[in-house]
Image: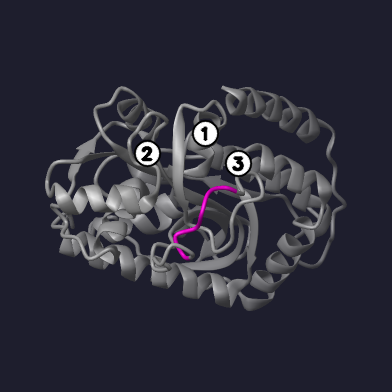
Amino acid sequence: MRHIEKLGLLSTAIVAAAAITTAPVMAGEYPDKPIKLVVASGAGGSTDTAARIMAINIQDHIGQPIIVVNKKGASGGIGINYALKAKPDGYLLMEGMIGGHVLHPAMNTSTGYTPADYAPIAMTQMNPNVLVVKADSPYKTLKDLLDAIKANPGKLKFSHAGAGSIHFFGIHLLLKTAGLGKDSAVSIPYKGGKKSMAGLLRGEAQFHQTNLVSAIGFIEAGKVRALAVTTKKRLKNFPDVPTYTELGYPGVDIFGWRGVIGPKGLPKAIVDKWAKAVQDTMKRKGWKKMVKAVGDVPRFMGPEEFTKHIDSDFKRYRQMATDLGILVK
């Protein structure tokens, strides 16, 4: 609940800031007019909030107002396909997100796009995944849980937000990395992350892996116990939660991310200008504070590194979708 309140206050601050923010016009060079930033989800969500945080803070570094445009539907496909049809002149870009830009096309060949159809510009933040069990669970450590799965194949259940969600892929990546079969635990799907967490709390599932932002409130309230996190180093807010890497499973390294993405064919000069502006924006204390409020961790990747990361993500999840029999053609 604490984070819902924070998002409410944050949205109010964003609206107020947007009303008073002005930016100088740079005539004769890019950009010489306002730029649209497409969010392929509804207003008020975490991706929308992240986009508005970036839009407000980056205007001083780009030199023009950034207008956020919401186009939701089809797991992000509607907004992304709309943006990909734009002229590659830098005046219509996208707020990148792992769900719409990677997971959706990875498990569905009819989306109309893959990472080859867009131009990654810069990653701005990440959202680690965390493995949790109920606070009164008998599984105190990751080893306890994995030992129980091995001893009782096909008995323990995990909740997730649907086949193809990062929750679903995360658990299957853990099982595979631990040398367990895909049917060693039972998949229990729910409509959305909140309901899948509720399923865990009601005892309908024994474990659940989700974005950190979705679990923080429950961890702090003592309702769930975190067994492992997908960051390379322990989180400052949760120093007692070990990483998968230190527990011997470095391959379980998935995390959600957000960033700026353009249509294919975007000129290098525009890509570089935006990447530099993003990097400068991420140094601002106000940006860092607001990103922390939505539960993300600042993480910059420039065009080349971001492109490689997205390509690697896509190949991993496409292969997993194929192996798990959920690839939609």
Q: In the rendered view, does 21 fall on the left or right side of 262?
A: right
- What amino acid is found at the position of numbered circle 2 in the picture? Gly
Alpha carbon separation for disc pair 2 and 1? 31 Å
The residue labelled by disc 1 is 219
- Check residue 73 in the rendering and tell me which mark sits there, or answer none: 2
- Check residue 273 in the rendering and tell me which mark sits there, or answer none: none
Q: Is residue 81 visible?
A: no
- What amino acid is found at the position of numbered circle 3 in the picture? Gly
- Residue at figure coordinates x 68%, y 44% from the top left: 291
Q: Secondary structure at mark 1?
A: helix
Alpha carbon separation for disc pair 3 and 1? 13 Å
- N-terminal of the pair, mark 3 or mark 1, is 1
The residue labelled by disc 3 is 295
- What amino acid is found at the position of numbered circle 1 in the picture? Ile
Extent of the magenta region: 240-245
Q: In the rendered view, does 133 fall on the left or right side of 264?
A: left
> Do tag 3 and tag 1 residues touch (Cβ < 8 Å)?
no
Q: Is residue 236 magenta?
A: no
Judge whether 1 appears above or below 270 on screen: above
